[in-house]
Amino acid sequence: MTIEPPVVPFPPTIPNALHHAATHWGGRDFIVTPDRRMTYAQADDASRRLAEQLLGAGLGKGTRVGVLFPYGLEWVVTWLAATRIGALAMPLATTYRPAEIRTVLRIGDIDTLITARTVLGHDMQDMLEASVPGLADADGPRLFLTDAPFLRAVWLTDGSDRPWATPVDFRAAPPPGVTDALLRAVEAEVVPADLAQVTYTSGSTADPKGVVHTHGTVVRATAALAALQGAGEEPPKFFCAFPFFWIGGTLVLGAALQSGASVLVTERFEPGVVLDLIEAEQATHVLGWPTLLQALRDHSSFPGRTLPSIPGLTVGPADVALVESPVPGIPAHRGMSETVGNIASVAHRVVDPDTGAAVSDGEEGELLIRGYGLMHGYYKQERADVFDADGWFHTGDRVFLHGGRPYFVGRATEMVKSRGANVAPREVELFLEEHFEEVLYAFVLGMPHVERGEEVTAVLVAAQGRAIDPDDMMTRAREQISGYKVPTRVEVWDEADVPWLGSGKPDRLAIRRRLEGEE
């Protein structure tokens, strides 16, 4: 089974997509925030200036560049600048706290981190010094730190008073010897097969997974959304409720570059602020998780708004994946980080996970995928550990087919999906056990929840002679890890209450049944 890639009007790389957009829609708004906007021509110019500074600092094809900004103009300019020179962009989540920043800097082999002095109210100088041991003592901008062994520089916008920081001005002139002609020559060597970005998402182990996509995959997998919205005289206006650092943001930005769409965005998802922007700009689409669209509909100001016809917001159900579902409440598969959020960009099979045999329509099985929209692989994992001998990726998703379309039933793995975000239970368990002396054991799993889809739930066992205050613990946990990973339901059990299997592992099924009985 194969699926043909779409034909795009330029060699499918991100810099070529940008040049095509700037040529055809240079005067159109590309990124719009409540107080700022940037056209395609301005994005081309700003990213050119930053790309030339990167070249002047010795960065180039394959350099790992960390991107840590709120969703807005600087994020997009940095992402474009890195990909224009063939560097490998590695977005860091704005929800990250020191333990997570330290982990991604290390496992991502990040060479240069580009960030702002302040991100969502957090002083990044303090945040980074709490993240990387030894950084606060570094006496120069060239870094050599054992806890982030490949990190050589941290570029900070808006000034810095630390000797380890490299101040950067996106509007600065290029360094001596770095010309527009040199950048054009560099861009000409960026090809569809080159690695473009790594999107980190919680994995089934303690470390997050790095989903690696090439330039060709990013452009081709996002072309379908661009074609769906069209590129006529009246360009679409997307409000992007997806964070840019997750794959939904890549999907929207890639589609915009190929359709001339305007991308509306706010630093935080605050329903009132979002509705103000949607109304002021008369957005044509709101792209985000169903829970976020429902939050907009539920806002007290929603009924009095002058809003255009927007699928999922003013027209039809909030969850369009439920439309025409053969089983009420079971959504069509939406895609995943491994497919740039587009399930239509890959061929699929549904098989019995025990035998590997194909199952009939309507029968549940595991979803297998392959094709032009599938990731290059996982960062630091060999191909044989990711794909089978025929190139199929075994997703671990339980689905059934109806009319050739997969419908998502659940996950064969233990991954928790809360408000659209993936949470690896073992990652949270290790964090709780390692960072809180009062915790002997932590067992984390997802329990059904009306608003979140699944609720991150923790069963904790206290160390001998210690007591656990769940509220205090979770407050402290939010200072170190992303809020969406922090359990919102915490149960404290005696050690004797924990069911164990003969193998010495906890009986998670029994734990789940007890939690279900206590709800």
Image: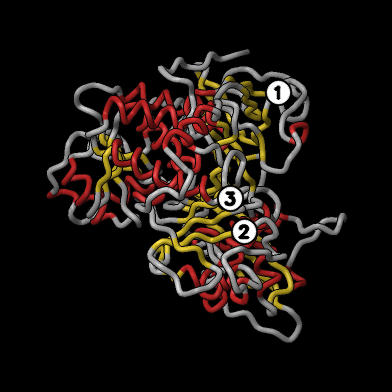
Q: Amino acid at mark 1?
A: Gly
Q: Residue at x 50, y 55 (%)?
A: 93
Residue 386 position within the rendered picture, expressed as x and y whole percent measured from the top left: 72, 34
In which quadrant of the rendered image does the C terminus lie? bottom right
Q: Residue at x 52, y 66 (%)?
A: 165
Q: Amino acid at mark 3?
A: Val
Please tell me which of labels 1 and 2 falls first in the chain.
2
Residue 490 appears in the rendering: no
Q: Amino acid at mark 2?
A: Arg
Q: Based on the displayed image, in which of its 4 quarters is residue 315 positioned? A: top left
Residue 269 position within the rendered picture, expressed as x and y whole percent measured from the top left: 34, 55
Left or right placement of residue 473 versus residue 16 in this view:
right
Considering the numbered disc 1 on the image, is that residue within a helix, a strand or a loop?
loop
In which quadrant of the rendered image does the N terminus lie? top right
Left or right placement of residue 511 versus residue 399 in this view:
right
Considering the numbered disc 2 on the image, is that residue within a helix, a strand or a loop?
loop
Residue 262 position within the rendered picture, expressed as x and y whole percent measured from the top left: 28, 37
Q: Nearer the viewer, mark 3 or mark 2?
A: 2
Left or right placement of residue 33 versus residue 64 in this view:
left
- The residue furthest right is 502
Q: Residue at x 40, y 17 (%)?
A: 9
Q: Which residue is mark 3?
A: 416
Q: Based on the displayed image, in which of its 4 quarters is residue 489 positioned? A: bottom right
Q: CA distance from mark 1 to mark 2?
A: 36 Å
Closer to the camera in the image, 246 or 416: 246
Q: Which residue is mark 2?
A: 152
Classify 293 as above or below 267.
above
